[in-house]
């Protein structure tokens, strides 16, 4: 039981990033990565790599609210 509580706490602290298909300003297919629930940009970059299955180009990277809102607009290469 104690292990389950520790695991749940770690997962809650780590958060997760989500990817939503979107059209980039240039008209190409891309993804909006939302990692507002995470503590570091690393989760965004990992989700971008996972979503694209490899390399990607960052179209826009934004942070607001003292790090409470983080988004990454990407296009897969």
Image: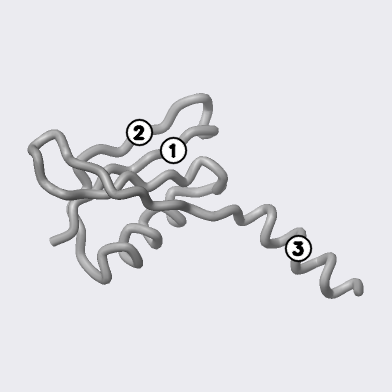
Q: Position of residue 72 (x, y in %)?
A: 33, 43
Q: Nearer the viewer, residue 51 or 38?
A: 51
Q: Quadrant of residue 73?
A: top left
Which circle marks residue 61 in the picture?
A: none
At 67% from the left and 61% from the top, the residue drawn is 11
Q: Nearer the viewer, residue 6 or 31?
A: 31
Of the two numbered discs 2 and 1 on the same chain, state the one appearing first in sequence. 2
The local secondary structure at tag 2 comes to: strand
Which circle marks residue 70 in the picture?
A: 1
- Number of other residues with Cα within 10 Å of mark 3, as a class: few under 14, some 14 to 19, many 20 or more: few
The local secondary structure at tag 3 comes to: helix
Read off the residue under disc 2. Answer: 62
Read off the residue under disc 3. Answer: 8
- Number of other residues with Cα within 10 Å of mark 1, as a class: few under 14, some 14 to 19, many 20 or more: many
At 55% from the left and 48% from the top, the residue drawn is 38
Q: Nearer the viewer, residue 28 or 40?
A: 28
At 43% from the left and 44% from the top, the residue drawn is 34
| CB-based contact (under 8 Å), mark 3 and mark 1 | no
Q: Position of residue 63 (x, y in %)?
A: 41, 32
Residue 27 placement, left or right of 6: left
Q: Is residue 1 above or below residue 46?
A: below
| CB-based contact (under 8 Å), mark 2 and mark 1 | yes
Q: What's the distance in space between the residues labelled 2 and 1, CA to CA?
A: 6 Å
Residue 48 placement, left or right of 37: left
Q: Position of residue 45 (x, y in %)?
A: 36, 56
- Number of other residues with Cα within 10 Å of mark 2, as a class: few under 14, some 14 to 19, many 20 or more: few
The tally of labels here is 3
Q: Is residue 40 above or below residue 7?
A: above
The local secondary structure at tag 1 comes to: strand
Image quarter hosting the N terminus: bottom right
Q: What's the distance in space between the residues labelled 2 and 3, CA to CA?
A: 29 Å
Of the two numbered discs 2 and 3 on the same chain, state the one appearing first in sequence. 3
């Amino acid at each position: 039981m104690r292990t389950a509580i520790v695991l749940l706490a770690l997962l809650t602290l780590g958060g997760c990033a989500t990817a939503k298909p979107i059209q980039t300003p240039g008209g190409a297919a891309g993804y909006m990565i939302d990692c507002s629930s995470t503590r570091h940009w690393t989760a965004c970059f990992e989700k971008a790599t996972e979503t694209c299955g490899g390399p990607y180009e960052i179209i826009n990277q934004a942070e607001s609210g003292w790090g409470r809102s983080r988004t990454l607009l990407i296009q897969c290469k």
